[in-house]
Image (spheres, rainbow, N blue to C red):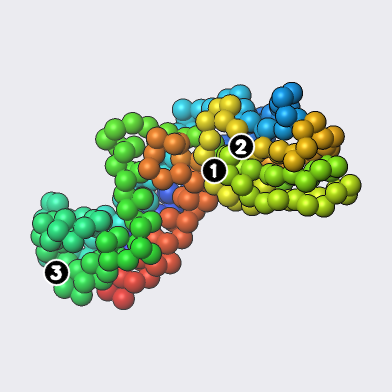
Amino acid sequence: MSPSLDSPRLKLERAKEHLEVIEREIERFLDDDPYALIEECDLQDGSHVFRMKVYAQPAGSLRLLVGECLYNLRSSLDHLAWQLALLTTPTPRDNTAFLIYRTGSSWKRNKGKIGDLPQRAQDIMHGFQPYKSPDNNWLYQLNRLCNDDKHRTITLLGYVLAGSSIKVRSESNIDIRTRGNPVRDLSQRFQATEYDALPRHHRVVSKDNAIIIEVIPDVPYTEMYIEADSSFAVSFGPEVAFSGNVAHTLLGYHGLIRDTVFNKFAGFF
């Protein structure tokens, strides 16, 4: 069989199948309202705080699915490297792989692994290295997540406050703070004021019971009407170096491999 992109594409397609199941499982999980923002009033100064409350964690089966998706995404790149090596020899070296390194010294120490690839393919792979451009950091993230899942522990999943809006009616100026940091002073009095305390898709991974939003009046015991709305997503857990919406992250990896990496090497086949 002649070298081709068939095998890498099959691996990538398998990852997409896992991703579709992951999206459905996450949607089902979030439908049960496992996370919430709980409002509390401080009787000392009349301020209001909203805390993150976690009622349930993603099931182990979902974590396994995420790991399998990561594996197939990463494996598609190694299959690509093998097919490129077959262009020059029927018996590529056993350690042929798609190299991903954060430093030039690591690349130099390991570039012999792609010695069977055509030189132009080696040069293109070199251009994808994370140390060559910040635009390639996604490859390091994918590699790290995959290696951690394979060799250390099943992928850890947590939660993320994907967005929050807050509407406040107050007889006093107020500060709205997120995680204790000033965001904006609201100076309008006696009228409803709506403010996005956390923009939609702002990825904040928080611990259970952590303060997310504070509403602090200038004048203690000011009467306030507060209406808060929030949305949540499943994220890579805080123990993982990279946190973000799991489904969006995996979908992004899939698209980058298909449209950027594969397209760059398509001319070899």
Estimate the x, y position of residue 236 in percent, counting from the top left: 46, 40
Residue closest to the eye, 29 or 263: 29
Please rate how many residues cluster around mark 2, counting C-alpha atoms within 10 Å: few if below 14, some from 14 to 19, many from 20: many
For mark 1, give the secondary structure. loop
Q: Which of marks 2 and 1 is nearer the N terminus?
A: 1
From the image, tell me which residue sits under label 1: 204
Residue at the far front in the pictured view? 219
For mark 2, give the secondary structure. strand
- In the visual, does 128 lie left or right of 48? left
Q: How many marks?
A: 3
Gap between marks 3 and 1 measured at Cα:
48 Å
Residue closest to the eye, 197 or 35: 197
The residue positioned 46% from the left and 50% from the top of the image is: 250
The residue positioned 85% from the left and 49% from the top of the image is: 189
The residue positioned 11% from the left and 57% from the top of the image is: 109
Estimate the x, y position of residue 115 in percent, counting from the top left: 11, 64
What label does residue 88 carry, if any?
3
From the image, tell me which residue sits under label 2: 212
Estimate the x, y position of residue 199 in percent, counting from the top left: 64, 52
The three-letter amino acid code for the residue at tag 2 is Ile
Please rate how many residues cluster around mark 1, counting C-alpha atoms within 10 Å: few if below 14, some from 14 to 19, many from 20: some
- Nearer to us: label 2 or label 1: 2
- In the visual, does 13 lie left or right of 123? right
The C terminus sits in image quarter: bottom left
The three-letter amino acid code for the residue at tag 1 is Val
The three-letter amino acid code for the residue at tag 3 is Thr
In the figure, 73 relative to 133: above or below?
A: above
